[in-house]
Amino acid sequence: MAGSPLKRARKAGVTGPGTGELIPFRYAPRVAELPRGWRRWSPAAKIEHALNMSLDGVAEVLYWPPGELDPHPLNVWAQVVRVAWMIGAKARVETRRERQTRRLVTELGRRLSEKNPEPPA
């Protein structure tokens, strides 16, 4: 029989534990398939695009108890955690870098204005 059961199960979707609701889950897009300007997207939009599900779906998957999952839902849970963690970490680093740059520019402007006071008009 052509194909593998795991690939067919992935294409079909994952049933959430407890609710039994079917959650469609596809492969994450390759970098070549990302639309133009994706680097300027918000972290939430990046997560939604990378996982191809809404943030509500991401939150639902994150609430699944990993110790009670079958292999396929556990794989989905692990991928959601990995993608959300990496995008969140990058957003945190970028935010910190922007704050540090703003602080340094303000400090430099203050020092320059102390060295060269403006003449009275």
Image (cartoon, helix red, strand yellow):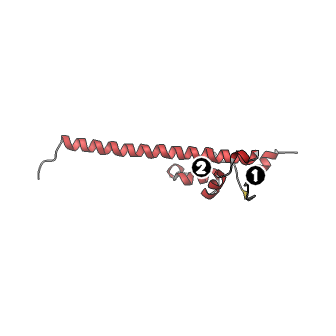
Q: Position of residue 44 (x, y in %)?
A: 55, 54
**In terms of secondary structure, where does tag 2 sit?**
loop
Earlier sequence position, callout 1 versus callout 2: 1
Toward the left, the furthest residue is 121
What amino acid type is highlighted by mark number 2?
Leu
Q: Which mark is residue 107?
A: none
**Residue 73 vs residue 121: left or right?**
right
Q: Position of residue 54 (x, y in %)?
A: 62, 57
Residue drawn 56% across the image and 54% down it: 45
**Camera sees residue 85:** yes
**Residue 115 vs residue 53: left or right?**
left
Q: Which mark is residue 34?
A: 2
Local packing at callout 1 (Cα closer than 10 Å; few below 14, some 14-19, many 20+) is few
What amino acid type is highlighted by mark number 1?
Lys
Can you identify the residue that label 1 sits on? 11
Residue drawn 66% across the image and 52% down it: 61
